[in-house]
Image (cartoon, helix red, strand yellow):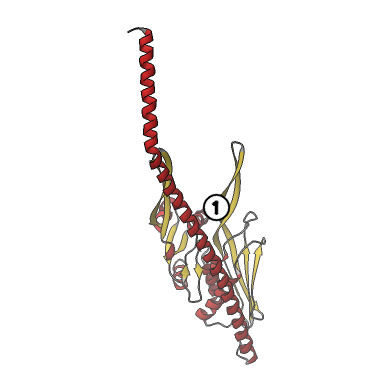
Amino acid sequence: MTYATKHKVCIFLLIISLTANLYLLALQQPVQDEQVRILQDSINSLEAENEILNAQISQDNVSLQSYASQIDYYRQRLNEIEYSMGLSSDGYEGTASLQAPAVYQSIEEYIDGPFIRQTVIEKGSMMDISVEIDPGKGRVLVETKPLMGVVFQDAANTAVFLAQNITNSNLMASDTIFSITAADEVPSVDGPSAGALMTLLMISALKNEQLNDSVTMTGTIDQYGNVGAVGGIVEKAEAAKDNGKELFLLPRENRRLVQYSYVEKNIGGFSIIERRPEIIDAKTHIEETIGIRVEYVDSIHDIIRYAVEIN
C-alpha cells in the first residue's frame, strides 16, 4: 500500500471516528440536559425551602422577644405588689463564677487567582461569667466586657426566676448583676447558650456553695429548668479542653452529632461532589477525638448533681 493510499485510509477512518463521536454526543446531550435540569430543580427547591425557614425563624424570634418583654413586665408588677404589701424579704448577698465556652465567627480572606475570597471560620473560646447578688431593688443587670453583640438579658432573667423557685428565695430586695468577660477578639457570642450555666451560678450564689472550676457546660434553660440544645458543641469542647476543663456538660438534645463526608460522583460526564451526612454520638466523638469527659444533662437538677458530685 502506497503512502498516498495509507494517508487516504487514515483520513477516512478519522472522518468515521469524528462522525461516530458526534453521533454519540448527540445521543448523550438530551440525557445530560435532563440531568442538569433535575439538579437545577433540586437546587431551586432547596433555596425556596431555605427562604421559608428563614422567614419562620425571623417570625419566631419576634414572637419570643414579645413574650420575654411581657414576662419582664408582669414579673416587675408582681415584685411591686409584694413590696407594697410588705411581703418582700431582706436583700440577699452572694457571688459565684465559672468559665463558659462560646463559639464566635470570624471572616478570613484568601487569594484565589485574580480574586479575593472570604470564608467564615468558627472557633471556640472561653468566657468568664460571674454573678453578684447585692441588696437592691429587684433589678437584673448584665454587663459585658468588652461590649459584644450578645443576647444575655433573657437568659439572665430566666436564670434569676428559676433560681428563686428552686431555692425558695425572694430577690425583690436584691439586685443581680451578671458580668461576662471575653477575649478582645470575640466580636459576638450566643447568649442563650449560657443560660444553664447562669442558672447554676445563681443557685450557687444564693446557697453559698463553692463550684468546681474544672467543670463547664453549654445549654439553654427554660422557666421549668429544662436544658435545651445549642450549636457549636465540638468547638466549645475544644475550647474547654484547651483551657484545662475536665468535665463538659452537654444537653442530651445534642447527643446526635452530624458529620459530613464528601463523595465524588460522575453523572453524564459531569463530576459532582456529594456531601453525605452521618449521625454519630456526640459524647463518644468528643471524648475520643478531643479528650474531655462528657456527660449529658436534661435539667438544671442534673447539672447540680454533677457539680455536687465532683466537689
Question: Where does label 1 land, which residue?
Answer: 122
Of residues 242 and 21, which is closer to you in this image? 21
Of residues 203 and 69, which is closer to you in this image? 69
Q: Is residue 231 above or below residue 227?
A: above
Q: Is 69 positioned to the left or the right of 254 in the image?
A: right
Disc 1 is placed on an element classified as strand
Residue 265 appears in the rendering: no
Which of the 4 image quarters holds residue 34? top left
Q: Is residue 229 above or below residue 279?
A: below
Q: Residue at 61%, 44% (x, y): give it.
A: 109
Of residues 73 and 36, which is closer to you in this image? 36
- Residue 130 x/y as whole percent: 60, 67
Q: Residue at 36%, 10% (x, y): give it.
A: 5
Q: Is residue 274 above or below residue 226?
A: above
Give the residue at the far top of this rendering: 2
Q: Is 189 positioned to the left or the right of 269 in the image?
A: right
Q: Residue at 64%, 86% (x, y): give it.
A: 80
Q: Amino acid at mark 1?
A: Glu
Give the residue at the far bottom of this rendering: 85
Q: Residues within 10 Å of mark 1 (few under 14, many from 20)?
A: few
Residue 165 appears in the rendering: yes
Q: Residue at 47%, 52% (x, y): give it.
A: 43
